Each structure stands twice: as structure tokens, then as C-alpha cells.
Image (tube, rainbow, N blue to C red):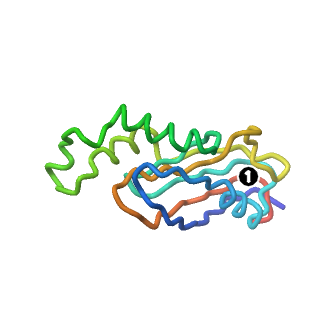
Amino acid sequence: MGFGIWTDRVEIDTQGNSQVLDITPQVRGVLERRGLREGQVLVFVTGSTAAVTSTEFEPGLCKDLPAFFERIAPRSIPYHHDETWHDGNGHAHVRASALGPSLVVPVAEGRLLLGTWQQIVLIDFDTRPRRRQLVVQCAGQGEG
């Protein structure tokens, strides 16, 4: 068992429109496959209209988060991005940029060090369903 860095990709189907998805099981699956004992896991979503964060994944917050983003970057106002590409998802780019594409979670004794009510979530802000790709990179002591 030595130090290493292992990179996996996970695909997730989403519905868009600020859908919040619990991706903790998929991240744990990579952690277990790679045998990471001590270190950290980086979770990164490719694309510029989705974001990754941590929160309590529960029905109320799955409604509160989209409502929050609608208040700070409403889809009903003009965006210069839409003038450029005419795709109607300028708000999705702004929302994803505000939250960010990645999260790093520490790992000890083979477990993600998340709080009792804390999960890793993907939020897809785009205007349509997508197949999202997550890059899950483990770094530390493990089996590889």
C-alpha cells in the first residue's frame, strides 16, 4: 500500500433546471474501488452549467437551493451570453460560476469525512437534461 493518485470518471443523467442530485454514493464507490485509506477525494464536474458542493440532501433544501439561485441569477433577465449564443442558458453559466465546479473531501480510515447530515451534491443549472461527467480523483495512501 503506497501513495498514489487515481482518476476515475462517473456519468450522471440529470434533468437540468437546478436539479440537485446526491452523488455521495458514486463518490464512495470510487473510493472503495481504489482502496483509498488516507488522503482526499476531488470531485469535479466537467462543463460550465453545473456545480458541485456539499449540503444536507433533503427535500426542503432541494427546493430552497433552486429558489435561492433564482433570486440571485434569475432566468427571466437578459444575459450577454444569450446574445452571443442564443441558447437561453446564460443564467445557468452565472449560477454554476458562482458555486464552482469542484469539491475536495478528506478521507481517513477509508471513509469520507463528511458530517452526519452532509452529502456531496451536483446541481445542474442547464435548461435541458444532460449526461454529466464527474471526474473523481483520489490522492493519498491506498491500494490503487
The residue positioned 34% from the left and 47% from the top of the image is 92
The residue positioned 69% from the left and 63% from the top of the image is 30
Q: Quadrant of residue 66?
A: top left
Q: Quadrant of residue 98?
A: top left
| Quarter of the image that includes the C terminus | bottom right
The residue positioned 29% from the left and 43% from the top of the image is 75
Q: Nearer the viewer, residue 64 or 112?
A: 64
Above or below — where is 60 with respect to 34? above
Report x, y in % for residue 100. Answer: 46, 42
Q: For mark 1, what is the residue?
A: 140
Q: What's under tag 1, amino acid-wise? A: Gly
Above or below — where is 71 with respect to 63? above
Instruction: Please indicate whether residue 65 sits to the left or right of residue 41 in the image.
Output: left
The residue positioned 38% from the left and 41% from the top of the image is 95
Report x, y in % for residue 112. Answer: 75, 48
Above or below — where is 96 with respect to 130? above
